[in-house]
Amino acid sequence: MMKTARRLDHIEPFYVMECAKAAAELARSPECADSPMIFLNIGEPDFTAPPLVQQAAEGALRAGRTQYTDATGLPALRERISQWYAERFGLNIAPRRIVVTAGASAALQLACLALVDRDDEVLLPDPSYPCNRHFVAAAEGKAVLLPASAEERYQLSAAGVAAAWSERTRGVLLASPSNPTGTSIDPDEMGRIVATVRARGGFTLVDEIYLGLSFEERFGHSALAHGDDVVSINSFSKYFSMTGWRLGWLVVPDDLVAPIEKLAQNLYICPSTVAQHAALACFEPESITEYERRRTEFRARRDFLVPALNRLGLTVPVMPDGAFYAWADCSSHSPSSWDFCFDMMRRAHVAITPGRDFGHHGSERFVRLSYASSMAQLHEAVDRLGKLLPHPA
């Protein structure tokens, strides 16, 4: 067999996708003919790009605007993202500090490659999105998972960061709102974390790809408010409903723009030109109105699903305040979330994600359900689960 690089030894399989493949295979089988699979396992909005965005993509194709852009993205798009920060969050983010990327995944890769050296340690909460720690591993660093409790909203605290910091710690990688929990870091606590890291000469990376889908004013603030040294990752996939377009962005300090640009030039030349031209239309008033309608719909889905899960004994310890995920404890029904998910997949034809991917601190008891599906699908899923699960006394 061909010899592979040792860094692969530090990157675990992406079990979310393994479960998704199993669910998709079962969905194609005859036993699902009369009861189609309901997919609550993948974090992808059921909404697609709104009409103005689709029209902008078609216009770019017809006009031949398909050639390479700058590695940092279209200047007009960087300007428009800057305006969005001013209009939505009251932040003055210079366009020169915004780097458009080939999805948020590319943004995370660029940031880790620019900031993490071999054997550097980066602190993350447990639970957290698995690919984030794998980006650290791909940069030959070490992701250190710190157990985060429901009382901490499954997030790191400044005190926890200070206690865990060692001579090998290089920084923190946070997500607010978080996948898989849908919980955010309180702005005051975020400020304390940034100050704690800054005092130690480290970096603060914050994955904010679900920031547009915050449901509560208290949490709907960008970490960029806490200083120009904060690095924010964002995306057009979630709030802007452009998952397959593979477009995201980074906000970085001035002195990090050139290193990031050099990496982007070598790794992928530039983001998709057509997607960038289409994304300009995301910020038109008509599009923003539609996105806000969708945000209201996601909140309504949350408000239906979480109480329904609690009634079924799938307890959600912390109400999600953003994104479209519920992190539910299934231990009253099974000691293994992996077995529970496959059992529900086969018997109820409801696909759910086991907690195995998201960490090691009690994740075996938890499942992640996505409410990115329609309200009708959520009602049907709850009905099916309710027929199989014994209700708690």
Image: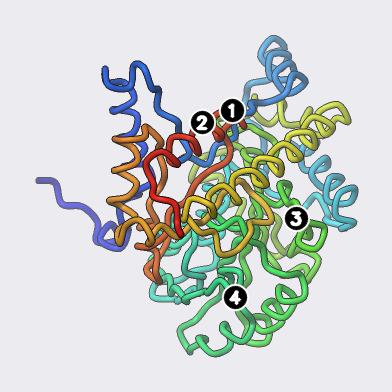
Foreground label between 3 and 4 = 4
Q: Earlier in the sequence, mark 3 or mark 4?
A: 3
Q: Please determine whether, in this image, residue 282 is positioned above or below residue 205.
A: above
Q: Residue furthest top?
A: 62
- Which of the two discs, 4 and 2, labels the residue nearer the N terminus? 4
Q: Is residue 219 above or below residue 244?
A: below
Mark seen at residue 376:
1
Q: Is residue 386 left or right of residue 69?
A: left
Which element carries disc 1, helix, strand or loop?
helix
Q: Secondary structure at mark 4?
A: helix
User: Which label belongs to residue 97?
Assistant: 3
Q: Quadrant of residue 176?
A: bottom right
In front: label 1 or label 3: 1
Element marked by disc 2:
helix
User: Which circle, 4 or 2, is nearer the viewer?
Assistant: 2
In this picture, residue 349 sits left or right of residue 30? right
Residue type, label 3: Arg
Is 133 drawn above or below residue 192 in the view shown?
above
Residue 243, position as x, y percentages in the image = 57, 34
Q: Residues within 10 Å of mark 1 (few under 14, many from 20)?
A: few
Between the C-alphas of marks 4 and 2, the distance is 32 Å
Q: Residue at x 56, y 64 (%)?
A: 317
Residue count near mark 3 (Cα–Cα under 10 Å), binned few <14, some 14–19, many ≥20: many
